[in-house]
Amino acid sequence: MSAVRTARTVVAAGLVAGLAATALAAPAVAAAPPAKPSHAATQQALDAAVAEGVPGAVAAARDGKDRWTGTAGERKGNDRYRVGSITKTFTATVLLQLQAERRLDLDDPVEKWLPGVVRGNGHDGRKITVRQLLNHSSGIYSYTEDPAFQQKVFGSGFLEHRYDTWAPQQLVDVAMGHAPDFAPGTSWRYSNTNYVLAGMVIEKVTGRPYGKAVENRIIKPLKLRATSVPGTDSRMPEPHSGAYSKLGAETDGPTYDVTDLNPSIASAAGEMISDSNDLQTFYRALLKGRLLPKAEMRELTTTLPVSAQYPDYRYGLGISWQKLSCGKEIWGHGGGIHGSVSEGYATRDGEHSLAGNFNADWTGDTQTVIEAEFCGTAPKKP
């Protein structure tokens, strides 16, 4: 359920396509076929991550009709993995669909749908809109920043509590035990509580768990056969590789297998499972306008600055915008959960896409894979 990853400074490489020339009075010469996109830099980035200690890395890309899959270490190209906060794009898409159907308005106060839920220590759902949940301008404290929760769920307590079930209301209650980060609409801060609440709004509007809406509105129509909303099921579907964590800030301590866990700790903020092929299909369909009408697409891609320190990163409604070092602009989301760091991005026209995963959460830099694929530059050796 990690927040944004900022672009690194690398040099872009371009692809040059040549045209065959014809001479006066000479037979016509057919144009040479365009150069096939190269993913050598992307493979180098995967190999570099494994050299840095990531047990396994996988990525897949599509560029026009070209398709490529690369792996390094203990990975298979069709591995499924926990996608963490990439779940947020699915959640936001469902809410935008419900708005398009006039079943809610993103400018509705949260209180309208969840009366009394966002209250305590200065939080007030009457002053926060659904839109502010989706673009992280609500100011609501993120439950994943609570020290006791962190120790129990992400620290050494994980081994004892990995199969515990957390109801969405319990996660929100953790957040309500703290003061807001700022008044609604006055700043930006990534908060997983926002999306737990967004999932609760979907359930209130549809009368069914948010995961059913994701399944019926996105997974089934797009035939995403490797994608699921596991709920409280701790198992990973096959095929998959292990997921590994240090369960703490130390990077030289013991390594734990954290593959199995109850994903209710993440709910609509980060519980989903997918693979690199399905994630690309989803983002390509979304950005090509197959899931939302034009008005909702405009709302999806209306962004806010996240920090003056990172001018090349902005956040929309469950989707982020990045300008890479080579000037390319991409849309998508990253996600982290125990032993799993994932990325899913595509150009605005949906033609060039990338999705991938590292099965470790203490080392490796997925941003180098993004830069390598879209800018064509391999990571520098340390």
Image (cartoon, rainbow, N blue to C red):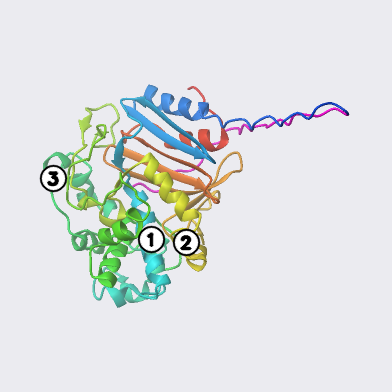
Query: Neighbour class for label 2 at 10 Å: few (<14), some, many (≥20)?
Result: many
Task: Give the amino acid at mark 3.
Answer: His
* Residue 336: image location, x then y, percent: 33, 43
Closest to the camera, between mark 3 and mark 2, is 2
Task: Give the amino acid at mark 1.
Answer: Ala
* Residue 204: image location, x then y, percent: 26, 71
Q: Residue furthest left?
A: 160
Looking at the magenta stretch, what is its main secondary structure?
Answer: loop
Q: Where does the magenta region start and end?
A: 1-24
First along the sequence among labels 1 and 2: 1
SS of the residue at dot 3? helix
Q: Residue at x 17, y 48 (%)?
A: 233
11 part of magenta stretch: yes
Q: Which numbered disc covers residue 92?
A: 1
Residue 379 in view in this figure: no
Left or right of 85: which side holds 18? right
Task: Give the amino acid at mark 2.
Answer: Leu
Left or right of 308: which side holds 247? left
Q: Residue at x 45, y 66 (%)?
A: 186
Query: Neighbour class for label 3 at 10 Å: few (<14), some, many (≥20)?
Result: some
Residue at which label 2 appears: 300
* Residue 235: image location, x then y, percent: 18, 42
Q: Residue furthest right?
A: 24
Disc 3 to disc 2, how far (Cα)?
36 Å
The vertical placement of 127 against 132, above or below, is: below
SS of the residue at dot 1? helix
Query: Neighbour class for label 1 at 10 Å: few (<14), some, many (≥20)?
Result: many
Disc 3 to disc 1, how far (Cα)?
29 Å
Left or right of 335: which side holds 146? left
Q: Which numbered disc covers residue 282?
A: none
The vertical placement of 222 against 102, above or below, is: above
